Amino acid sequence: MNRSARIRLVLTVLFVALLATPLVIKRLALQRSRAASTELDASAALTRYGFYLSEVSHAAGVDFVHHAPTLDAKLGPIMPEVASMGASVSIVDFNRDGWPDIYVTDSAYGSANRLYQNMHDGTFKDVAPEMGIAEVNQSGTGVSMGAVWGDYDNDGYEDLFLIKWGRPELYHNDHGHGFTRVSEEAGLPPWINANTAVWLDYDGDGLLDLFVGGYYSENIDLWHLKNTCMMPDSFEYAKNGGRKFLFHNLGHGRFEEVSAKVGIDSRRWALASAAADLRGTGHPDLFVANDYGVSELYLNDGKRFHEAGAASGVGFAPKSGMNVAMGDIFNQGKYAIYVSNISEDGVLIQGNNLWVPRDGQPGKPLAYENMARDLGVELGGWSFGAQFGDLNNDGTLDIYLTNGYVSADRKRSYWYDFAKVAGGNASIIGDAAHWPAIDGRSHSGYQQKHVWLNDGAGRFVDVARAVGVTDTHDGRAVALADLFNRGALDVVVANQGGPLLLYRNTVTAANQWIEFSLEGSTSNRSAIGARVTVRWNGQEQVQEVSGGSGFAAQNDRRLHFGLGKNPHLEEIVVRWPSGKLQKLPDAKPGQLNLVKEPS
Amino acid sequence: MSGQTITVASAPSMPPATRWRKWFSLENRFVPPIFITLILLIGHLSFGILESYKKTLLAITVSILTELVLGRTVTGKWPHMASAYISGISVGILLRSPAFWPYALCAIIAITSKYVIRVKNRHLWNPSNFAICVILFLAAESVTTLSIQWGNNLWAMLVIWFLGSTIIWRLRRFHICAVYVLSFLVFAVLRARMVGDPLVAEISPITGPEYQLFIFFMITDPKTTVRPRWAQCVVAFTVAAVEMVLRLRSSIYAPLYALFLVGPVALLIENWWALRHAPASQPRTLAPGVTP
């Protein structure tokens, strides 16, 4: 064999090896994900992962099925696509009985929202009709897309802001006995097509303000379209969506819209938002995940917001932002931000983003690095809502992610037609009449959910099926709460056109926990923005009371910390929105600790 | 996209004005790399099309290094880097993946394919077309191609169409683009009638950035296209026809796969035809002087 032949042989072998490389990588990935595909064995799950989840909605008296809206008939051919949101869930103790209740939205005209009152015995009862917040999807007023709760008048009872494609509604909580609609008195605009809102006290005056992110333009009545040019003008650079609103709480039940005045001016298609003090300034910053474009990060100096998405790294690569959740995943006192996007094998691999703050020096601007791939939480299908929570009480925050867009005919997919239009010119993509009819096809439907368990060593492992999460509904919203006051985070999932799921969590008794219920005095009474730092066994974790997070969701305001085995509590500090620091030397693990802000 | 490698005869006694005109005539081996770099820069600075500079740089670096190593090892000479640069940058633009490894692997496969899959001293596939199709086949869970990222903006598209058409015209390959585009439009009308979708939905793909790169850099690649002008037109039409069939089967990457299927077959037919009609006195090799 001469030299030329030898070289050719070596090259051929190398070439074959190169072609085989993707197959080897795929095989290794399959081996790693084997845990996710194992069926539930409760005993094994408890031993191996420290918890398992049981779907108990029916037994708990919750038989809710969401109905999607039916918009203008001009959108008929693509109705499942444009009417693909509206299922939401928020947790609230509306009557201050110490037990979390559940509010869920329906989205068809004439359908009723539900307020599931916790009956303290493992069951719930719908009390929305007698409370006056059921019949809120009336023809001509739009339909519900979500709900966030906050005590805007500091009377001790959580009030309801109803996010709608339509007339936004504010309901005052009349001391747990009913709700009074106060939208006009509050000064809300007549129409917003929104999918996200969050309560926050951006100026630290002790009164909760309200951010609302528009999706479709507020100038469009989706039931009476003048024309079909209402779609995004780009799949990843769209700026023709709804405007943003920031309602500054003036007190006495009145709000003033100040978004432009304080530096929030965007027409990107907002789908999710959350607020937290990301820089330790004492002021809540605002993160907005936009569909069809980049995310926006509004840094708050206490009076104005400064958009720093591109500068911080989170607003550079455009994707399809669906979710914002914040959690201290490394127990370092810093929030990582989880933004879900779209991934479909062989079609579109955006990958979810897990924005982890870079180690910075004092005075240096905030910068983030996407570590979703490194940590194993990148690919979640057509992802929607996700939340951080310590599901097994081991002391590290895990992630529950739901997903799935349109589940219809299993054998026929809409992806091809979607892709050919989505890549086209703005004048094509922006007109709904140009989109091929979906015609009963699925679009990233029937997707397996993800429960990513934080191993505490820099990796998340998907254990969804192994811990009992096997549903494949079109998931939208996820909310976490210790529904039964047992020291375990349960999971509530709202599905588009599907049932509300209650996953009751069973956690190994070996792992300890501690919970806090905060009430502000100088600060807003809901304590939204209050930050609790728990230091134990040489580590620390921070959590903040949130006025809305995830996708169309709000977790329980009570904060739940897992502590692992044999915890030695070193210090617990509350930093209130007013700036006051309060140490809790007497807080006890294994119980809910009630904390009032010292006046 | 192995590069537009039209060789220009040197003109030692050329006056400066003529030399400049010659340079600007675009009959220059560096023009295609400069053009594709311009597209990248316009796309990125106006819309941020690159998720990461690092991934594109990785693809370019790996592509060039592979070309250097293989070129030196196989031919004993240092190869010209224009072709490898275009392959690398094409992979960097067209491939989309959150991971780094697909960019490196795709670039290596692209360059290596030129040296391994050869018939009569000629490589059959456009290297980046071959590599991207292979990666799409074998690693569908990890990669996609550029399909939506370019702002869906009319002006960016027009600038690229104008620049691309001008350059391709001067390189005397515009007829390939024209035949392909016209064929695509005719087949779009046909598809719309067959499947009942809006006509603009069928035309929509060609208004996207993926097609601009495909038309200006892949189907016109001199190394992997047949030589007679009429045959080039037939091949361009056939690519559009096969793409039509693939589109009716809902293949998202129809143009890439169509070229993958049609390109080598056309070259093999040309080889076969040339061998069949070559005078017996001449050596039966093709494409004299063609190097990888």
Image (spheres, rainbow, N blue to C red):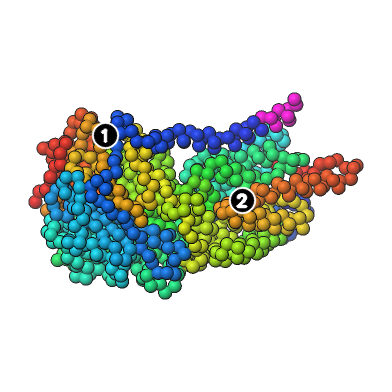
Q: Amino acid at mark 2?
A: Leu
Q: Position of residue A148 (x, y in %)?
A: 25, 57
B84 left or right, relative to A222:
right
Res B76 label: none
Q: Pointer 1 and pointer 2: residues touching (CB < 8 Å)?
A: no
Q: Main secondary structure of the magenta part?
A: helix
Residue most toward the left? A599
Horizontal side, residue B240 vs residue A568: left or right? right
Residue B237's x, y, as percent?
Answer: 70, 58
Above or below residue B183? Residue A89 is above
Q: Is residue A597 magenta?
A: no
According to the picture, the residue beneath numbered tag 1 turns out to be A394
Residue, x 20% and y 61% (percent of image)?
A129
Give, as a single range, the part of the protein colored magenta.
A1-10
Q: Residue at x 74, y 42 (%)?
A: B122
CA distance for labels 1 and 2? 49 Å
Q: Name the residue at the top extreme.
A: A1
- Host chain of mark 2: B
Instruction: Check disc 2 and report the residue beneath it.
Output: B256
Q: Residue furthest right?
A: B281
Mark 1: amino acid? Asp
* The C terminus of chain B, quarter of image: top right
